[in-house]
């Protein structure tokens, strides 16, 4: 009535193999997606430049060579020529994926000739998948938040609040 044991064992084995294959496929796709997101994040960079004299201003330079916009790039500059080290934070609301650098003059003293490495930069940004990344000397690029809050800004660049919901305003909540 129910068939022989060999047929049942073969059917259960085939079903088990199919389930394992599906689980492995889903896991591999998730890993591939995360590797691609990391590759894109690694194409966002920021560094400090010292403009030539006269003036010798210290500039924060940000560049996005990835395929998508990044938001809320925050640069933290530490000055190790003073004790305790001074800390300055600056931000850029968005860095478009043009590959063109964005320059921001920092309100800090230009380093003297023997102070070339006076300042150290750590920067963070949020990608379009709401992942928050940090790049620091010594640790490189690190994912620090999976579902980061995004800060919205008014037309003058002043932060007006955190946004977590990715739906468009016209989408229904049902």
Image: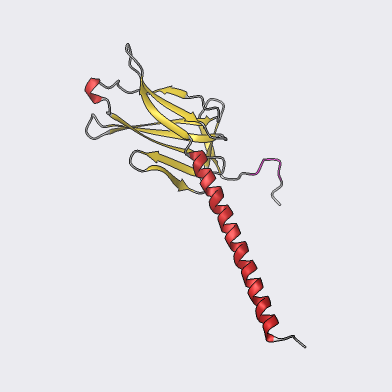
Q: Where is residue 90 in the image (x, y as percent from the top left)?
A: 41, 30
Residue 13, compared with residue 63, is above or below; it is: below
Residue at x 67%, y 40% (from the top left corner): 169
Residue 52 or residue 94, whichever sits in front: 52
168 in magenta:
yes
Vertical position of residue 10 compared to residue 22: above or below: below
Residue 128 in magenta stretch = no
Rendered image coloring scheme = secondary structure
Residue at left 65%, top 44%?
167
In this rendering, position of residue 8 left or right of residue 46: right
Quadrant in which the N terminus appears: bottom right
Task: Please determine whether, in this image, residue 64 is positioned above or below residue 59.
Answer: below
**x, y percent for residue 116:** 27, 25
Q: Where, by quadrant of the figure, is residue 77 drawn? A: top left
Relative height, residue 147 to residue 2 (above, below):
above
Q: Can residue 42 be seen in this view?
A: yes
Q: Magenta residues?
A: 167-171
């Amino acid at each position: 009535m129910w068939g022989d044991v060999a047929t049942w064992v073969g059917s259960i084995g085939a079903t088990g193999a199919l389930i394992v294959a599906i689980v492995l496929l889903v896991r591999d796709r998730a890993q591939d997606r995360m590797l691609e997101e990391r590759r894109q994040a690694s194409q966002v960079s920021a560094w400090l430049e010292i403009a030539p004299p006269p003036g010798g201003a210290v500039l924060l330079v940000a560049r996005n060579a990835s395929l998508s916009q990044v938001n809320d790039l925050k640069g933290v500059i530490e000055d190790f020529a003073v004790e305790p080290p001074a800390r300055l934070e600056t931000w850029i609301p968005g860095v478009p994926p043009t590959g063109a650098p964005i320059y921001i003059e920092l309100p800090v003293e230009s380093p003297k000739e023997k102070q070339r490495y006076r300042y150290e930069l750590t920067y963070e940004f949020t990608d379009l998948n709401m992942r928050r990344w940090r790049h620091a000397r010594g640790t490189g690029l690190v994912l620090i938040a999976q579902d980061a809050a995004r800060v919205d800004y008014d037309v003058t660049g002043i932060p007006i609040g955190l946004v977590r919901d990715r739906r468009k305003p016209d989408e229904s909540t049902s």
